[in-house]
Image (cartoon, rainbow, N blue to C red):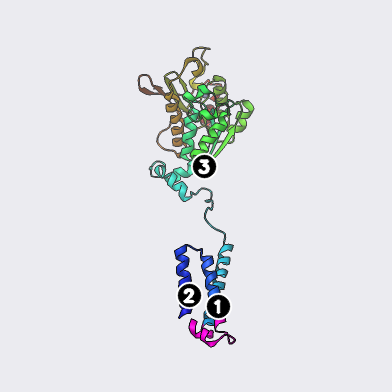
Amino acid sequence: MIGLLGFAAIFGAGRWFGWSSRWMWLAAWGWLAVLLVAHAPYMPPGLGRFVGGEFRGWLLLGVLAVVALAYRTGLRRLRGQVVPKAEVAPKPGTFSPTELDRYARHIMLREIGGPGQKRLKAARVLVVGAGGLGSPALLYLAASGVGVIGVIDGDGVEGSNLQRQIIHTDARIGMPKVFSAQVAMQALNPFIEVRPYHRRLDQVTAAALVADYDLVLDGTDNFDTRYLLNRVCVAAGKPLISAAITQWEGQISLYDPARGGPCYECVFPVRPAPGLAPSCAEAGVASPLPGVMGSMMALEAVKHITDAGEGLRGRLMIHDALYAQARVIVVTHRADCPVCAGLHRAAAQS
Ligand SMILES: [Zn+2]
């Protein structure tokens, strides 16, 4: 009787004083050893009777306990060999449960759905310029789940950028814009790939980069780059979403002569005379205006990739923020366009 009470006392006291289970079991094994010794033939017989039970009974209990312990240890060792399946990367073209939850509001849209979200994941979009237009465009492309997003810009973050270039932060002044943008995008969505190119766009870089992407977004603020990018995109047959802003007005279109519609140079054949189309640095710009137009770029990109609704191919949207008006005008290709005329002649003959 005393023997059983001893075990009860050990586990009771262990609970009460908060011993670790290791110590409780050690004490129990110790007590079992005491009981066995008390029943040993060389001990006075009164001691055996005092603790209760008999030698063979206690020995059987000890053997059972050893077997149970061996079984448990073996089971643990087997489990240890099994590789945990917790974070298995989903197969290409499929989504993990976390991603499904992340993109749920897209997937429930009839025009996007699961197939559209897969297209976004498979898409590769290049954004030229990580400035006013690039900031919201890059953030929304990242949030939308565009699989690979390239961003090219040769500048660093400056204090005067932060009035509108919201992808950057005060703490990142001095950092190259593409790396600052990468930090923000990957903080927003770790399920996408961001490829930063810290350099200015020239003819060679443009041709090599554009070939690597399905769609190009032009958010630059200078005409040399705009015309260069247009030529490269037309030559590579890649669609180009181009937006521009000044002061209170913005415009945006999708230039895609390979699939009909004009190129940028069809619509703007003549460069504005110096001073007639001043940059934001020269003329100023309302802080949220690049936010509106850059977001529209991302929206048109999502529509283009998922084939939702009607895009801006052959249509130029002009947003007059000062008077809260927007209008869309039809734009067509020019037969004498030096950039894309060949494309249209080829299309007409076939
Ligand atoms: Zn053209």
Q: Is residue 38 within the magenta segment?
A: yes
Please tell me the numbered disc located at residue 291: none
Q: Is residue 163 left or right of residue 67?
A: left
Task: Identify residue type, mark 1.
Answer: Val
Question: What residue is shown at x 44% (from left), y 44% (from top)?
Answer: 102
Say if residue 279 shows up in the picture: no
Q: Is residue 329 magenta?
A: no
Image point 46% across, 35% down: which residue? 140
Tell me the crowding category of disc 1: few under 14, some 14 to 19, or many 20 or more residues within 10 angstroms, Cα based: some
Question: Answer yes or no: do the residues labelled 1 and 2 have beta carbons within 8 Å?
Answer: yes
What secondary structure is found at the residue carrying circle 2? helix
Check disc 3 and report the residue beneath it. 190
Q: Residue 109, how many percent across, how many down?
A: 38, 42
| Residue kind at label 2, given as amino acid type | Gly
Q: What residue occupies the far right of the structure in this picture?
A: 204
| Residue 300, percent from left and from top | 44, 32
- Of badges 3 and 2, the one in the foreground is 2
Judging by the rendered image, the residue that carries numbered circle 2 is: 6
Q: CA distance from mark 3 to mark 2?
A: 58 Å
Quick one: quadrant of the N terminus? bottom left
Span of residues in magenta = 37-57
Q: Which residue is mark 1?
A: 34
Residue 21, position in %: x, y? 51, 65
Pointer 2: residues within 10 angstroms few (<14), some, or many (20+)? Answer: some
Mark 1 C-beta to ligand 1 under 8 Å: no
Q: Is residue 212 visible?
A: yes
Callout 3 amino acid: Pro
In the rendered image, residue 208, in percent from the top left (x then y), is placed at: 62, 32
Work out whether residue 24 or residue 105 is closer to the camera in this orientation and state it: 24
Q: Quadrant of residue 105?
A: top left
